[in-house]
Amino acid sequence: MVLTMRMMMECEQAGEAEKIAHEALQGAADKMERYTLSDTKPYWKIDGWYVTVIRATCKAERSPDGAREVAERITDKVAWDADGFDGTADARPEVMGSTFAHPAVRFCWFYFAQ
């Protein structure tokens, strides 16, 4: 199963954003064969936020349970779509109140493909 994720975090520069992403993914590392970070840039809607795209090859076959097992290593709350492969997590208390593996992470979008 292949994961594409957009991770948004509160930080000052791209290098710091990539370090935060690596740290946030450490808990899920045993569920992944490999991952890469790309396209790290300031988030255009919110000053002081960065977004990075993460692509990972996961060890599990594509299934809703496999997707949840990976995501729950990164955050405690995810709102999944009906098929269980597309989800979002948001740290804002008024939206979801998700807690992430790294405190600077504010939002993640997950998509699990074949």
Image (cartoon, rainbow, N blue to C red):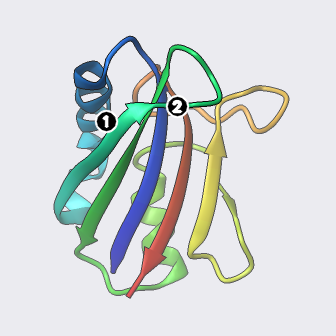
Q: In this view, does 37 lie to the left or right of 76?
A: left
The image position of residue 6, as x and y in percent, is 46, 50
Q: What residue do we see at 26% from left, 49% from top?
A: 38
Considering depth in this image, is 86 or 29 the residue closer to the camera? 86
Earlier-in-chain disc, 1 versus 2: 1
Of 59 and 18, the residue lying toward us: 18
Q: Which amino acid does label 1 sit on?
A: Ala
Quarter of the figure that contains the N terminus: bottom left
Tell me which residue sits at (50%, 76%) in the image: 65
* Residue at the extreme front of the image, as rendered: 44
Question: Which mark lies nearer to you, 1 or 2?
Answer: 2
- Indicate whether 88 appears above or below 113: above
Residue 36, x across and y down, in percent:
19, 54
Residue linked to disc 2: 43
Does 32 sit left or right of 66 as displayed?
left
Q: Mark 1 points at which residue?
A: 21
Q: Is residue 111 above or below residue 91?
A: below
Q: Is residue 60 above or below residue 10?
A: below
Q: Give how far across and how far down residue 47 sits, in percent.
A: 57, 16
Quadrant of the rendered image containing residue 58: bottom left
